[in-house]
């Protein structure tokens, strides 16, 4: 059974203040993960935030406002993006491929790759519309989806722990980072469990906000006293702004503008490399798309894939959002488990709240000083609340198995779940290279694929449908043979 919602998908808060606070929870939840993709690929942070907001609005429109999902930059495409940026770049320039401001990168290849991904999503969606979705339930039963959802959550566990141990300021203390992460986690947990009225509905705002204020106070004391160990918040994004230049106030470093001015010459022969790099990853993220939407539907008590809005609309929304995001910032869009967990923990599934979060995210992305403020959020604080967010995703998978009454006395169910969990959490990946391009199947995708194959092979045995008396009699007969 799904938990009772305080605000359903089509309901909105009555008070503007509540609406804004609920929206900020979604922004805080996705913030560090969203801009990490930009950090790792050397692309602009402002357009990445803008793309998350614009992409989610596209998704909301495509799904007719019936799916409480927030889209932001996808980690699955980081390797593909870096590879595409390097197409046609000289051997000497490859080491600088993720250097911000370097125009010796193939921005157009990334844009075309993301447009290709969007097209693949739409084609798959139209095929599903033509041939129906009954096969989907047979292909992805609860015994497969439940463990895959657990893998999605637990697979992010290392990211949460790594963020908690991250020291943002040179000379800072890892112990202080860990402490601030724990402060954020404990305050969030206490507010969620013991909080009354509004406090229980905005635990992430209170938890992350309190930890940030405490970190900022300690940082200012540390800077004044010359004690680096107390410095937790990196204020460089603010102090490095050129307040005399209009470019510091308005972020317009969009991907398509970089593509126009890039030094690398794009040739039609490069299209093959773009296809090889991005097409396999798109099939991987489609699998993850299905798993994420199964999880969201399980939380809110609706079948988003077979019912309303339907997988055709969710895939089209995600695909078009990715194509647009590629043009704006170069990153693909994907459903964010962090925001799904926010819906589950707070029981606020309002799409209107998510829409406001999109508007605010776009605003923060355009206005340079606001973007800089968001960049000062310590990773350790986000890592602290991620202990709850990512754990909630994994727990949702367990809850699905319980609600569906999956019988783990059956050997086939044990084997299917075991392989999915070990492959997914163990981090098994498969990469293959064609020419100068490399494509990778992530551990989450591989765990789902192997689960599907095992589920197809390990059909229920005849004795699985026998009564307890018949099973006892069969066991006694086997004992006599021994």
Image: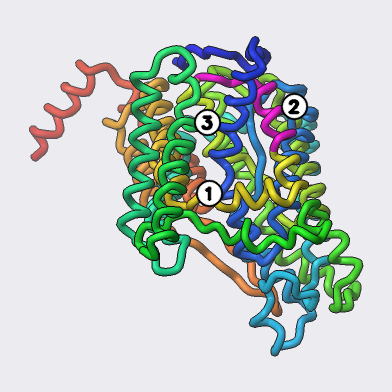
Residue ID at (30%, 31%): 408
Q: Is residue 327 depicted above or below 3 in this figure?
A: below
Residue ID at (47%, 49%): 447
Quarter of the image with the N terminus is top left
The residue wearing badge 1 is: 377
Are the residues at dot 1 and dot 3 in contact (C-beta closer than 8 Å)? no
Q: Is residue 393 depicted above or below 111 in this figure?
A: above
Q: Which residues are magenta?
A: 347-360
Q: CA distance from mark 2 to mark 3?
A: 17 Å
Element marked by disc 3: helix
Is 96 placed left or right of 130 in the picture?
Answer: left
Q: State which tag comes first along the sequence, 1 or 3.
A: 3
The residue wearing badge 3 is: 295
> Which of the two residues, 219 or 181, is positioned nearer the viewer here?
219
Is 202 placed left or right of 58 in the picture?
Answer: left
Q: Is residue 38 depicted above or below 292 in this figure?
A: below
Q: Is residue 292 depicted above or below 432 in this figure?
A: above
Element marked by disc 2: loop
Quarter of the image with the C terminus is top left
Q: Quadrant of residue 58?
A: top right
Residue 359 forms part of the magenta stretch? yes
Q: State which tag comes first along the sequence, 2 or 3.
A: 2
Q: CA distance from mark 1 to mark 3?
A: 28 Å
The residue wearing badge 2 is: 63
């Amino acid at each position: 059974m799904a938990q009772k919602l305080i605000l359903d998908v089509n309901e909105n808060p009555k008070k503007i203040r509540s609406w804004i606070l609920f929206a900020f929870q979604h922004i805080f939840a996705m913030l560090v993960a969203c801009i990490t993709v930009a950090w790792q690929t050397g692309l602009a942070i402002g357009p990445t935030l803008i793309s998350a907001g614009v992409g989610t609005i596209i998704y909301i429109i495509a799904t007719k406002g019936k799916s409480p999902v927030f889209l932001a930059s996808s980690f699955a495409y980081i390797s593909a993006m870096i590879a595409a940026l390097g197409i046609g770049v000289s051997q000497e320039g490859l080491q600088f491929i993720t250097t911000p401001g370097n125009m010796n990168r193939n921005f157009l290849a990334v844009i075309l790759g993301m447009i290709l991904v969007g097209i693949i999503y739409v084609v798959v969606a139209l095929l599903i519309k033509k041939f129906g979705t009954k096969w989907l339930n047979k292909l992805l039963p609860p015994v497969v989806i439940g463990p895959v959802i657990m893998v999605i959550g637990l697979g992010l566990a290392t990211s949460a722990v790594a963020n908690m141990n991250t020291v943002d300021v040179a000379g800072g203390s890892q112990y202080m980072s860990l402490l601030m992460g724990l402060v954020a986690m404990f305050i969030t947990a206490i507010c969620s469990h013991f909080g009354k009225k509004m406090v229980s509905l905005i635990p992430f705002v209170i938890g992350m906000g309190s930890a940030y204020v405490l970190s900022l106070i300690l940082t200012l004391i540390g800077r004044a006293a010359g004690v680096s160990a107390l410095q937790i918040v990196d204020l460089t994004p603010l102090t490095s702004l050129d307040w005399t230049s209009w470019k510091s106030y308005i972020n317009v470093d969009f991907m398509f503008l970089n593509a126009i001015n890039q030094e690398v010459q794009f040739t039609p022969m490069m299209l093959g490399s773009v296809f090889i790099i991005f097409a396999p990853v798109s099939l991987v993220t489609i699998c993850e798309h299905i798993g994420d939407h199964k999880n969201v539907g399980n939380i809110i008590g609706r079948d988003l894939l077979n019912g309303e809005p339907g997988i055709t609309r969710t895939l089209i929304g995600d695909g078009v959002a990715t194509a647009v995001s590629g043009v704006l910032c170069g990153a693909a869009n994907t459903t964010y488990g962090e925001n799904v967990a926010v819906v589950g923990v707070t029981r606020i599934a309002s799409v209107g709240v998510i829409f406001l979060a999109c508007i605010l995210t776009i605003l923060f992305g355009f206005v340079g000083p606001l973007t800089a403020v968001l960049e000062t959020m310590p990773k350790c604080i986000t890592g602290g609340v991620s202990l709850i967010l990512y754990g909630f995703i994994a727990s949702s998978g367990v809850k699905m198995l319980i609600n569906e009454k999956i019988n783990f006395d059956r050997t086939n169910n044990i084997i299917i779940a075991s392989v999915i969990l070990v492959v997914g959490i163990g981090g098994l990946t498969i990469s293959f290279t064609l020419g100068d391009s490399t494509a990778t199947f992530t551990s989450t995708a591989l765990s789902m694929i192997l689960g599907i194959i095992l589920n197809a092979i390990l059909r229920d045995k005849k004795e699985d449908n026998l009564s307890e008396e018949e099973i006892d009699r069969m066991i006694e007969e086997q004992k006599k043979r021994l």
